[in-house]
Amino acid sequence: MERKEFLRTLGAGAAFAITFPCLGSCSKDSTVEGDIVTPPTDVDFTIDLESAEAAKLANNGGFILKNLVVVVKNLEGEFVAATQICSHEQYDQVRFINQDGGFFYCDVHGSKFSQTGTPLNEIPNSTSKALKIYNTALEGSILRVYE
């Protein structure tokens, strides 16, 4: 039986019910919640850890977003900074997940990266490029994030 004949036997309503969800999920923009942006260059900024801006960095596993960078106080209490731009397709949706030791995650296509930027999963049609990690330096209550 050919596809057209099969669909005719199902009826238009059933065919629509079966094919519409598939077509919707195949659309590239159907689940995307971020923007495609260029990764930042010449990153060099500071955060006063005593400021309201840094409140989420008071606890291990907390993170903030600043200048397209995810700044994290990891589960061991160390500061780590990574680009907020996923290396898979340049969406600005990278966040820190404080599970399984802590990792960076992009919810657009499910890319996962270690705290050193190494890809932790294979995304179809991906180049498996590492996530950009920035240097951090703490002096008193001032955290510097830089390249």
Image: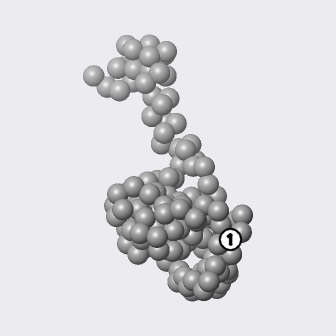
Task: Kindly identify the amino acid type of the residue bearing the numbered disc 1.
Answer: Glu
The image shows residue 82 at horizontal and vertical percentages of: 52, 72
Q: Which residue is mark 1?
A: 50
Name the quadrant containing residue 140. Answer: bottom right
Rate crowding at label 1 as few (under 14), some (14 to 19) or many (20 or more) other CA atoms within 10 Å: few
- Image: 75 above or below 5: below
- The picture places residue 106, in percent across and down from the top left corner, at 49, 58
Helix, strand or loop at label 1? It is loop
Q: Nearer the viewer, residue 101 or 121?
A: 101
Is 30 on the left or on the right of 119, as rendered? Answer: right
69 up-or-down from 23: above or below? below
Percent x, y for residue 141?
64, 79
Q: Is residue 49 left or right of residue 105?
A: right
Percent x, y of residue 17: 47, 21
Q: Is residue 6 left or right of residue 67?
A: left
Write the residue at 60% across / 86% down: 139
- Tell me what residue is drawn at x 64 percent, y 58 percent: 35
Considering every residue shown, the one lying at the far right of the view is 52
Tell me how the rendering is colored: one colour
- Whether residue 102 is visible, yes or no, is yes
Residue 43 visible? The answer is no
Q: Residue at x 48, y 39 (%)?
A: 25
For the N terminus, give its image quadrant: top left
